[in-house]
């Protein structure tokens, strides 16, 4: 016997079934969950407990923490090869970093030329403490290539220690060797019954930072029944450099400065600032140029249409303090050519007077 089968379903049941289906689909995602990859060590040995820890392989391209010898680069400038401690991290240190973050200490910060005094929290850190550079220095980036063992660090130019052209750290200055010095000049004339001679000398002794100097002259004349001979002690003084003050100390015979008025001779003590303690690029007056680069960029400074300075800066704030002084007046035109093709332009007013000093510097006498 055949049982008739019908496909006609009442409309009300059709809407009911559709509602149940949609409700089920809406509820279903709430029961879904994500599970990380797990490698069962029992696949290697019957007793999986004796297998070494394999958890680091579950996270893909992750490398073990430890000490690695890497090529250190700062702002695309090679610093040197060095052993650096790396720790595991979840922060972004590059696609090829293997999940490692370099551990910075005070010695490494000095190696890359970071001005730690600009960040009080860094200056207070102990030398053996691991410092997270990304959190300590704004706008800093780290890119580590584990395969090439190359560590690239990008930090704003303004956070670096002074790198003026010709700059030499004071701790590398040499006081010279102990020495005796004698510079002299002798001239004379001898004729029929007339003799005249002149002798001048500048002698000295160098011992450590001290310099002892004596300047004198001798005159002799004889002729026509007249005779004269005289020694003149022009001056004797001792001097030395005061490096922390960028100044010179003079005790004895000397002259005052002549920047504004004529110098006046004196016998006493003089302490005055000396431009000779600064590199050539920081002697005399020149303005400070500041700006912000959005990417690694080429910086060009022009005056009266001529290029007077050109350099490259990393992303972030920068500060140029080593412009050579120029004798002519004229505003400075600053151009920043970004790596992405954009360009920034602005003008810095510039004018100079005889005793104008660079920003942050004072002169005394």
Image (spheres, grey):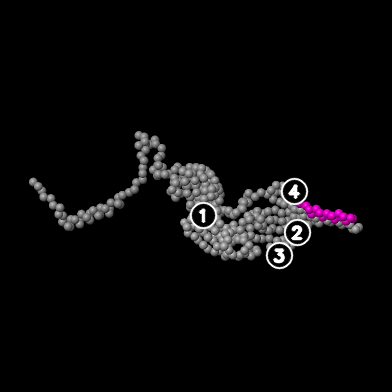
- Say which element carries label 4: strand
Determine whether 266 is above or below 2 in the image. below
- What is the x, y in percent for residue 57? 40, 42
Q: Residues within 10 Å of mark 4 (few under 14, many from 20)?
A: few
Residue tagged 2: 267
Q: Nearer the viewer, mark 4 or mark 2?
A: 4
- Residue reaching furthest to the right: 225
Question: Quick check: can you spot residue 127?
Answer: no
Q: Which residue is mark 4?
A: 180
**Which one is earlier in the sequence, the residue at label 4 or at label 1?**
4
Looking at the rendered image, the disc whose residue lies closer to the viewer, 3 or 1, is 1
Q: For the point 67% across and 57% down, which residue is it?
A: 274
> Of callouts 4 and 2, which one flags the residue occurring earlier in the amino acid sequence?
4
Q: Label 2 crowding class (10 Å Cα cut-off): few <14, some 14-19, many 20+?
A: some
Asked if residue 362 lies in the magenta stretch, the reply is no
Q: Residue at x 46, y 49 (%)?
A: 93
Residue 314: which disc? 1
């Amino acid at each position: 016997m055949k049982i008739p089968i019908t496909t006609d379903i009442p409309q009300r049941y059709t809407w009911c079934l559709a509602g149940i289906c949609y409700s089920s689909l809406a509820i279903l995602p709430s029961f879904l969950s994500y599970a990380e990859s797990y490698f069962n060590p029992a696949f290697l040995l019957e007793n999986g407990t004796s297998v070494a820890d394999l958890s680091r392989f579950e996270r893909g391209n992750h490398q073990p923490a430890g000490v690695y010898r890497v090529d250190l680069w700062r702002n695309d400038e090679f610093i040197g090869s060095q052993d650096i401690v790396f720790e595991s991290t979840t922060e972004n240190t590059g696609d090829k970093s293997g999940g490692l973050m370099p551990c910075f200490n005070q010695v490494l910060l000095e190696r890359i030329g970071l001005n730690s005094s600009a960040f009080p929290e860094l200056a207070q850190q102990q030398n053996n403490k691991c410092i997270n550079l990304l959190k300590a220095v704004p706008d800093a980036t780290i890119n580590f290539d584990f395969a090439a063992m190359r560590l690239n660090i990008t930090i704003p130019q303004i956070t670096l220690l002074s790198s003026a052209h010709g700059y030499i750290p004071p701790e590398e200055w040499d006081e010279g060797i102990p020495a005796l010095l004698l510079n002299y000049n002798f001239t004379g004339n001898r004729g029929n019954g007339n003799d005249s001679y002149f002798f001048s000398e500048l002698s000295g002794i160098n011992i450590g930072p001290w310099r002892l100097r004596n300047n004198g002259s001798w005159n002799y004349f004889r002729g026509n029944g007249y005779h004269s001979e005289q020694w003149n002690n022009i001056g004797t003084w001792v001097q030395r450099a005061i490096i922390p003050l960028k100044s010179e100390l003079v005790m004895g015979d000397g002259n005052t400065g002549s920047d504004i008025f004529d110098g006046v001779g004196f016998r006493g003590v003089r302490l005055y600032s000396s431009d000779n303690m600064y590199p050539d690029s920081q002697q005399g007056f020149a303005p400070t140029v500041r700006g912000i680069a959005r990417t690694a960029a080429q910086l060009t400074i022009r005056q009266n249409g001529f290029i007077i300075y050109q350099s490259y800066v990393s992303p972030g704030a920068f500060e140029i303090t080593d412009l050579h002084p120029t004798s002519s007046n004229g505003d400075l035109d600053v151009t920043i050519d970004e790596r992405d093709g954009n360009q920034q332009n602005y003008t810095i007013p510039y004018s100079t007077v005889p005793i104008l000093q660079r920003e942050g510097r004072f002169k005394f006498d």
